[in-house]
């Protein structure tokens, strides 16, 4: 369906029932937010699941505007989405083309008390010793693991089809009264 066809569908619905267009729009936008939220959570792989649990949706209606915002307040979400350090700069496929992160150009050390050695080894960090004791883990950052941008970008067609379905259903419902 083209934008012109879709706009004509909305216009017809509004002509039949002025409140119906707004009702369906609100439902469609809310469902779109849920679709993006679900997809974002699916794209996250982590040990604890904390990042996935932090992905939220905020639906708002202000005057004639309806919006659904998918977000996370997790402090490490941007590092996960965009990557860090030289590794992030070298491997950031899939992030939004409208974002140009600046990456630290050197590696760094993570203190030993930040995690156990086996976990650091699992992440591929270099174990740093001093006098036989582990003092930290060397890293050059992590590659990007986008989840927010692809969650929206990859679901655009599904959202459009769902919105069209909702409008067509409401139009049929009104016409059959």
Image (cartoon, grey):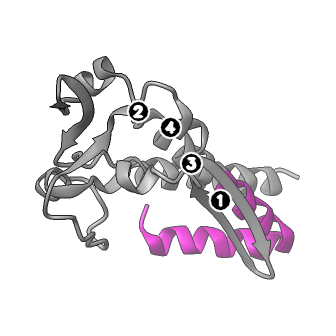
The relative height of residue 32 versus residue 112 in the rendered view (above or below) is: below
Residue furthest toward the top? 118
The residue labelled by disc 4 is 41
The residue labelled by disc 1 is 29
Q: Earlier in the sequence, mark 4 or mark 3?
A: 4
The residue labelled by disc 3 is 162
Q: Is residue 152 visible?
A: no
Is there CB contact under 8 Å for labels 4 and 2? no
Q: Which region is colored magenta?
A: 1-30
Q: Earlier in the sequence, mark 4 or mark 2?
A: 4
Residue 113: assigned label: 2
Q: Which of marks 3 and 1 is nearer the N terminus?
A: 1
Residue 128 position, x and y percent, is 17, 33
Q: Which residue is drawn at 61% across and 67% down?
A: 9
Q: Which of marks 4 and 1 is nearer the N terminus?
A: 1
Is residue 9 within the magenta segment? Answer: yes
Q: Of circles 1 and 2, which is in front?
A: 2
Secondary structure of residue under mark 4: helix
């Amino acid at each position: 369906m083209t934008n012109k066809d879709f706009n004509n569908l909305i216009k017809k619905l509004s002509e039949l029932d002025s409140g119906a267009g707004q009702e369906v729009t609100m439902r469609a936008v809310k469902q779109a937010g849920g679709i993006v939220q679900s997809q974002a959570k699916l794209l996250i792989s982590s040990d604890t699941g904390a990042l996935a649990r932090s992905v939220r949706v905020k639906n708002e209606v202000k005057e004639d505007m309806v919006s659904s915002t998918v977000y996370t307040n997790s402090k490490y979400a941007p590092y996960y989405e965009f990557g860090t350090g030289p590794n992030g700069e070298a491997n950031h496929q899939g992030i939004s083309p409208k974002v140009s992160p600046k990456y630290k150009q050197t590696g760094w050390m993570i203190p030993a008390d930040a995690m156990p050695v086996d976990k650091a080894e699992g992440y591929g960090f270099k174990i740093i010793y001093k006098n036989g004791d582990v003092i930290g883990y060397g890293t050059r950052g992590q590659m990007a693991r986008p989840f927010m941008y692809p969650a929206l970008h990859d679901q655009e067609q599904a959202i459009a089809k769902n919105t069209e379905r909702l409008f067509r259903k409401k139009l049929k419902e009104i016409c059959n009264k």
